[in-house]
Amino acid sequence: MPIFLTLAMLAPFLTGATDEQAVQIDKIRQAWEQRQQQTPFATFVWTETRVIPRGGLNGPFHKSADEDRPAEDVVITIPDVRCLLGPRGRIRFETEDLDSRLSAPEQKPSQSAFDGSRATTFIPPRSEPFGSGIIDETYGDKSSLSLRPLVLLYRAMDQALIDFELRNFNLLQHAVVVDGVPCVVLKESVGSRFSDLASSLCLDSSRDFIPLRYTEVHVHDAEETVVAQIDISYQEDAEAGFVPATWRASLYSPSGRLLEGASASVIRYEIGKPIPDREFAIAFPPGTKVADKRSGQMYFVKDDGAPRAIAHWGMKPTDDLTGPSQYGFRRIWLPIVNLVVLGVIVAVYFYRKAHSTSR
């Protein structure tokens, strides 16, 4: 459910804020709330071009002797990235993650959705003939930089879809000019979410505080290094107001090295047209191997849609599921091992998603 903040709730968190600053932040809150309420449904489709320099996908444990990922600069164009927004935190997002595109260029896009109470993610087949599904209580893509332009504009007050809270931001004394437009700046307090990461927003006060720039900085020994930045431009719609038209994003390492760049161009959108509830829940196709993080259960989806329980994540649809691995000692320890392995898989997957400008 959305969290709406009143001025009285904000005041205790505005350290050193003047009355004028508090009033300005309350205006921002009201503008965000109003835009969210006036836009219960929205559909956006855009084309995205991404540039990954050599070594841009090297993990945190990459050694100098290891092969760079990718081995050379890569340019990828994704023609139809799709996002659906609904009321009460509902969302559907379809795109291609980098690992999938590099290993299987013809692969179908990944999908993630949240229906307000249950999150589902489907990852198409890679090396195995079946895809993977994840079920969770919270939406894992809420930290996706690729979704930031739309979420910041239409769902900035919805805690189901945004990973920060307005109450943790302060209004800076000075303005910042973005593409020739003077902007008020909100800066997140370090430590409100992460001990070494903070965000800032440049908002156009002349256009109902629409976001023109989003920045994430890494903080170490009181020094800040930009690790992500998104610049957004708009087109004016006679009925919907200012609508995102293009955006540019860059992702950097804490040392300042460019890891990825992306540019997006909206090719079509619909504002206000109702979206059926079924669009906000993913139906896993037969053969999908599913991990339900809520219960710890794992299963294959049978041809009739029913679940077929499995003892551990490494099993295949053709394996004998009635063997001794479900009983005795293994019955006790395998679920624990499964959860550990699953946690690693999910963590790596969403690490890639959260630290990618598109997913």
Image: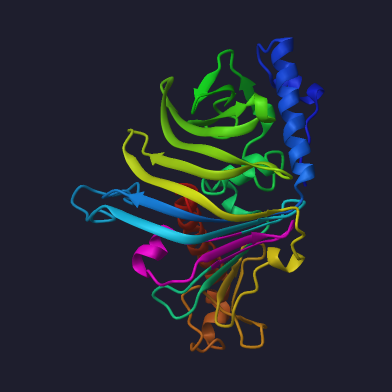
- Residue occupying the point 26% across, 50% down: 54
- Residue occupying the point 39% across, 75% down: 127
Q: Position of residue 234 (x, y in %)?
A: 58, 40
Whether 233 is among the magenta residues is no
Q: Position of residue 206 (x, y in %)?
A: 66, 25
Q: Nearer the viewer, residue 24 or 342?
A: 24
Question: Would you say 278 lies left or right of 357 here?
Answer: right
- Residue 359 appearing in the image: no
Most extreme residue toward the left, as rendered?
65
Range of the magenta residues?
93-122
Question: Would you say 219 lies left or right of 200 here?
Answer: left
- Residue 42 appearing in the image: yes
- Residue occupying the point 66% across, 15% down: 15
Whether 110 is among the magenta residues is yes
Q: Nearer the viewer, residue 45 or 358?
A: 45
Question: Would you say 288 lies left or right of 155 here?
Answer: left
Q: Position of residue 303 (x, y in %)?
A: 62, 88
- Residue occupying the point 57% across, 48% down: 147
Q: Is residue 76 above or below residue 237?
A: below
